[in-house]
Amino acid sequence: MAEQQTILVVEDDRNLAETLVYNLRQEGFDAEVARTGLEAIAVTRTQHPDLVLLDIMLPELDGFEVCRAVRATSAVPIIMLTARDDEVDRVLGLELGADDYVVKPFSLRELLARIRSNLRRVELSSGSEAQQALSIGGLQVDPASRTVQRNARVLHLLPREFDLLLQLMLNRGIVLSRNQLLEKVWGPDYFGDSRTVDVHVRRLRMKIEPDPADPVYIRTIYGVGYTFDGGQRNRDDA
């Protein structure tokens, strides 16, 4: 029998938190609650949940600060819960390392689908067949150990950033559309939009490019998508 997966619900609204915990347990998950930002950080570091549902509006620390703190020590999937369908909130959450977001009010069916999608992505990443290490233009990626180095210096990538880089490198010279990258990296049942890809590419460039403003690895093909150029400088890059 598979080990029960634990969801940490970070929500200060007692009624909503209890409703979420009840329904998650009905679906076969273990579920715990943290009602403040500081409590959420402590529970994540000591109990290591399999996924975090993180409300933005919290006492002590807001969800953005919690996301930043959790990401400093953990790659646990984070789904942010926001009461506003505000693009600024969504982009900021993704920039800080959130994997997904859900706008309140949301249907339980949609939330469960997103939870399962994110957990499935982690399982597929950890259970994927070993691939040979790639070395292109001074950038070395090892799928077996999920490590990245540039000129022998270790780079620290989040799981989605690693998966995105790996897909681009495996398809070197091929232009991949945003929708193709969403399907390859986030999975066919991902609910988000193509802006998610742009945010992750921007964040990835900050980590792997010698000069993120003048990238030599990941090239933008305007109106189409992205391609991996292998370190060949192109002044038309975005």
Image: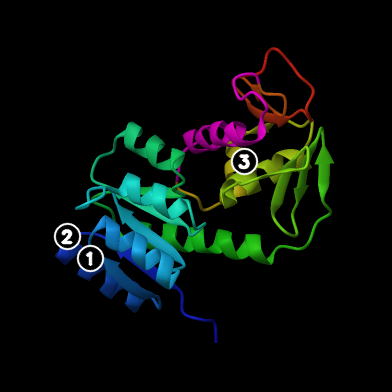
Task: Please identify the quarter of the rendering in which residue 92 is found.
Answer: top left
Q: Secondary structure at mark 2?
A: loop
Return the x and y of residue 56 as percentages of the image width and height: 28, 48
Specify the amino acid type for callout 1. Ala
Q: Magenta segment range?
A: 192-214
Amino acid, disc 2: Asp
Q: Answer whether residue 210 is magenta in the image.
A: yes
Observer-side mark, 2 or 3, equals 2
The chief SS type of the magenta part is helix
Please tell me in which quadrant of the rendered image residue 35 appears: bottom left
The x, y position of residue 157, in whole percent, is 60, 46
Please report the residue visible at 33 percent of the width from the left and 46 percent of the height from the top. 65
Residue pictured at 44% horizontal, 41% vertical:
94
Query: Could you tell me which residue is drawn at 21 percent across and 70 percent down?
Result: 18
Q: CA distance from mark 3 to mark 1?
A: 34 Å
Q: Secondary structure at mark 3?
A: helix
Residue beneath the point at 41% across and 70% down? 46
* Label 2 – label 3 distance at C-alpha: 36 Å
**Residue matched to label 2:** 13
The reply to whether the C-beta atoms of the residues labelled 1 and 2 are less than 8 Å apart is yes
The residue labelled by disc 1 is 17
| Closer mark to the observer between disc 3 and disc 1 | 1
SS for callout 1: helix
Q: Which residue is mark 3?
A: 181
